[in-house]
């Protein structure tokens, strides 16, 4: 026997909260990683330019393999949807 189709709630009555999918709690891992990368770049620039620390120069051509490794690790570690 088939169950009857659910009809939308009449106007003025809020929908049943148990029928909605659960909301995610807290920030996602990807957001945290991107934030940490931006923070790291900003701190590196600040220490090099403002504080005058003698930090080694990093060429962007040297960083693209690190970006690929980080992307691959994130794809493996992220939770399945």
Image (cartoon, helix red, strand yellow):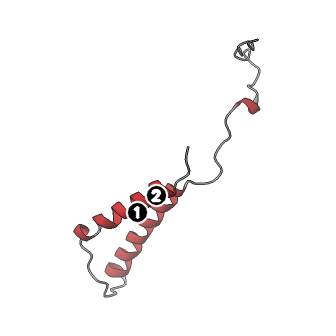
Q: Residue 14: percent from the left, percent from the top?
A: 75, 25
Q: Is residue 26 left or right of residue 68?
A: right
Q: Which residue is mark 2?
A: 74
- The structure residue drawn at horizontal position 63% and vertical position 46%, both measured from the top left corner, is 24
Q: Which residue is mark 1?
A: 70
Q: Quadrant of the N terminus?
A: top right
The total of numbered circles placed on residues is 2
Q: Residue 65: percent from the left, percent from the top?
A: 30, 65
Q: Residue furthest bottom?
A: 54
How crowded is the residue under tag 2: few (<14 C-alpha within 10 Å), some, or many (20+)? Answer: some
Q: Quadrant of residue 11?
A: top right
How crowded is the residue under tag 1: few (<14 C-alpha within 10 Å), some, or many (20+)? Answer: few
- The structure residue drawn at horizontal position 69% and vertical position 32%, both measured from the top left corner, is 20
Q: Quadrant of the C terminus?
A: top right
Q: Residue 30: percent from the left, percent from the top?
A: 49, 56
Q: Is residue 32 left or right of residue 42?
A: right
> Looking at the rendered structure, which numbered label has been put on residue 55?
none
Q: Real-space Cα distance between discs 2 and 1?
A: 6 Å
In the depicted structure, whether residue 13 falls above or below residue 30: above
Callout 1: SS: helix
Q: Give the camera-side residue of 44 and 25.
A: 25
In the depicted structure, whether residue 14 falls above or below residue 24: above
Q: Is residue 37 left or right of residue 78?
A: left
Mark 2–mark 1 CB contact (< 8 Å): yes
- The structure residue drawn at horizontal position 58% and vertical position 54%, both measured from the top left corner, is 27
């Amino acid at each position: 026997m088939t169950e009857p189709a659910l009809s939308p709630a009449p106007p003025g009555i809020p929908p049943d909260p148990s029928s909605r999918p659960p909301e995610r709690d807290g920030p996602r891992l990807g957001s945290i990683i991107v934030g940490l990368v931006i923070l790291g770049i900003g701190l590196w620039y600040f220490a090099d330019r403002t504080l005058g620390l003698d930090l080694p120069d990093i060429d962007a051509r040297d960083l693209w393999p690190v970006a690929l490794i980080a992307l691959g690790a994130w794809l493996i570690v992220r939770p399945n949807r």
